[in-house]
Image (tube, rainbow, N blue to C red):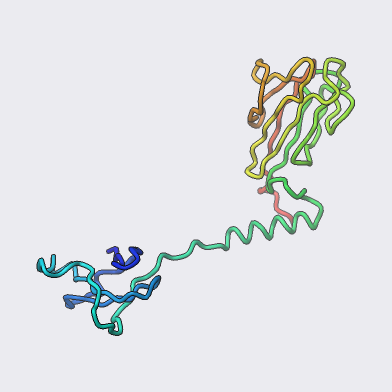
Amino acid sequence: MIVVCPACQARFQYDDSRFGQTRLKRFKCPKCAHVFEVVNPAFGFLPPEETLSRPLTVPMPPEDEPTPPAPVPAARTTAKRDREAMLIAAGLHVPGMPPGLKFSLAFLSGPQASTVQVIEQPQTIIGREDGDVITRDPETSRRHAMLEIHRDGTVWISDQQSTNGTLVNGERITGPVQLLSQQEFTCGNSTFMLLVRNTDEFPLH
């Protein structure tokens, strides 16, 4: 059953089988320390002059206390954070990048066709001669597009005011667009495929 404190309205879980044959139980709220009485559900409703949770006029030691909600275990979060710190210390993970994922760009067409470049930073500039991914494509602007990898593992692409634009699904984009693994996009005459691989199956030894 759910016990509600009449003073602060806090709600707590309580096993009603612990009432036994007792008609009323005294409780002390773990949140505000208010003492009140609760009727045993097995006895039905109290007479009209009484209420389900009534405050006591004279404080008395409670017979029982409701159980507060159990805190969410932090072990999984702590383990993930420790693993990320270990990978960073070993030089296998860049701060700001989501752990457990590897990102790459495959050149499908253009001067760099049939090559693959690993993405190692949260922000990657694609350009003709300037940036992190160099296309050497005369139809690509000097700083053409930017890839952003968020902590949740999603990848977004935005055009950097290029001359010929950035195309996703054959359409020129005007703002940030999310890319999925194995999705293609085009900058000038260069077409790329985003590759995202889960590396959790290859733990650090």
**As displayed, is residue 78 above or below residue 195?**
below
Side of 167 relative to 125 (left or right): left
Look at 71% across and 30% down and name the residue there.
194
Side of 169 relative to 29 (left or right): right
Quarter in which the C terminus is drawn: bottom right
The percent position of residue 23, horizontal first and vertical second, equals 16, 75
The percent position of residue 133, horizontal first and vertical second, equals 83, 30
Side of 126 relative to 184 (left or right): right
The percent position of residue 191, horizontal first and vertical second, equals 76, 20
How many marks the image carries: the answer is 0
Q: Quadrant of residue 60?
A: bottom left
Look at 74% across and 17% down and name the residue there.
165
Look at 67% across and 20% down and name the residue there.
173
Q: Quadrant of residue 113?
A: top right
Quarter in which the N terminus is drawn: bottom left
**As displayed, is residue 151 above or below residue 36?**
above
* In the image, farthest residue toward the left: 47
* In the image, farthest residue toward the bottom: 61
Of 202 and 62, the residue lying toward us: 62
Look at 25% across and 83% down and name the residue there.
58
Of 189 and 156, the residue lying toward us: 156
The percent position of residue 20, horizontal first and vertical second, equals 20, 76
